[in-house]
Image (tube, grey):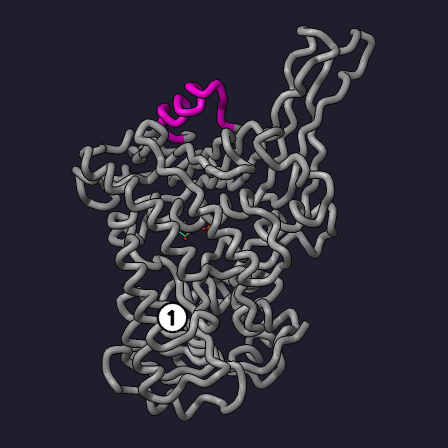
Amino acid sequence: IPVDPFDLVIFGSTGDLAQRKILPALFRRYCAGQWPEDVQIIGAARSDLDSDAFRDLVAQSLRTHAPAQFRDSSALNAFLQRVDYVALDALSDEGWGNLAAKLTIDRVRAFYFSVGPRLFGPLAERIKANDLATAQTRIVVEKPFGHDLGSAQTLNATLAAHFSEGQIYRIDHYLGKETVQNLMAVRFGNMLFEPLWNSQYVDHIQITVAESVGIDGREEYYERAGAMRDMVQNHLMQLLCLIAMEPPAKFDPDAVRDEKLKVIRALDPVKPHHIVRGQFEGGPNGLSYRDTVGNPRSTTESYVALRAHVSNWRWAGTPFYLRTGKRLVARSSVINVMFKDAPHSIFGADAGRHANVLSIRLQPNEGITLKVTIKEPGQGGMRLVDVPLDMSFAEALGPENQNPPDAYERLVMDVIRGNQTLFMRGDEVEAAWAWTDPIIAGWQARGDVPKPYESGSTGPGDAELLMKRDGRRWQGIN
Ligand code: BG6
């Protein structure tokens, strides 16, 4: 469905995120025919470029980052005609008049802050001071949204001084992933799962976001953040919320976000022996974490595994195990809902114990698998075996779904449509920090040092022990 005409200003438009993600996402939506012709995309940054030089830069990025079938030059040229540029400085008045002159009156006007959080305040102030904000103005901000609760509160207050909450779109790109949205469709669009979705039937839940990449190119940021701030506080927390939340009355921004917030607020503090930190060592495919950041004594974690508890009626007694790390054996994000064993085996002890597992694969090979128990074929008596009921979206929905839209495509279009359902509300972000901060403070107070793990492995051995102590084990990363 085409959206209304809009002006989108991208601050930090020469940066990595804009070039690798935002502009390719806009281009793909353009190719899909989702925009009217008179849209304007205005890059803004400090670099002293003219519009043609900026278009050249965008063209280069699209040739690298847009999917091959969209690199055809007529579509590319048509897209570039919608792209413009102003050189401006967030910290001075320079360039703001030029930006004002380019904006169209009376249409959706979105300002994308693809810059570090220290510029959020100055940008918000200058947008206001130059009278660029209208009733149809939206601003989009990226993580990291703060470094801890205090800094997140300050950022929220800074933005709130200039914009209403309904105008602020805080991106967590995991919410834009197709399968993450599918998680809600599976839970709330089917009768099958919801009655079993509680501690009576679910033994535990595993959320894994494994990455094979390291942190190259982002050493400075990562060394200050670590896996807890970079991944757990936001992406894994959002996945946990969507799995654990109560059904909202409707799929509307505040109804969904109210339910997610209740989950975060119901999280117990994590006990020190329920959390494992790791740091990757060097190996054939790269340097160790410490060598990468050039700090031989770094205690920043590149891996976290933890056991969380949502203390409410639905989930009392069902642990949520979360793990994420860099330089692991494979890139694999998956949520496993591990159901309890059947209470009694009518087939006798020889048949073994079997439990259903619902796996929601976020990436790669997006899809859902339900492991069910059936009879092993043959004459050998009643032996049981587990088989997957497998739904790969690409297979089930046809080849056009081979390449699901990138999260940013969905999210940027939602900004234009004015739909905040897949964006984080200020109180959610703060609640997530309120849960994360004591964990990090505990590490600091105890002088905790992350456990080394081999690059290309599944993480530190202690993460296996975390499960083993509870009589459980992680599902494989692959
Ligand atoms: C980002 C983190 O938010 O998400 C990165 O800062 C991480 O460290 C990335 O690599 C993972 O995103 P995706 O979409 O590749 O799973």
Q: Position of residue 138 (x, y in %)?
A: 46, 75
Identify the residue at image location x=26%, y=86%: 93
Identify the residue at image location x=28%, y=76%: 122
Q: Which of 378 and 442 is in front in this view?
A: 442
Give the quarter of the figure containing the N terminus: bottom right
Identify the residue at image location x=68%, y=43%: 392
321 relative to 168, above or below: above
Tell me the kind of residue under disc 1: Phe
420 displayed left or right of 232: right
Q: Does the magenta stretch include residue 273?
A: no
Q: Give the range drawn in magenta.
A: 459-474
Q: Is residue 473 magenta?
A: yes
Quadrant assignment, res 5: bottom right
Secondary structure beneath label 1: strand
Q: Residue furthest front?
A: 313
| Residue at mark 1 | 113
Q: Where is residue 147 in the image (x, y as percent from the top left)?
A: 28, 54
Q: Residues within 10 Å of mark 1 (few under 14, many from 20)?
A: many
Query: Is residue 363 visible in the rendered structure shown here?
Result: no
Q: Position of residue 407 (x, y in %)?
A: 53, 58
Q: Where is residue 22 in the image (x, y as percent from the top left)?
A: 47, 66
The mark tally for this picture is 1
Q: Which of 113 and 81 is in front in this view?
A: 113
Label 1 CB less than 8 angstroms from ligand 1? no
Identify the residue at image location x=56%, y=35%: 336
Quadrant assignment, res 191: top right
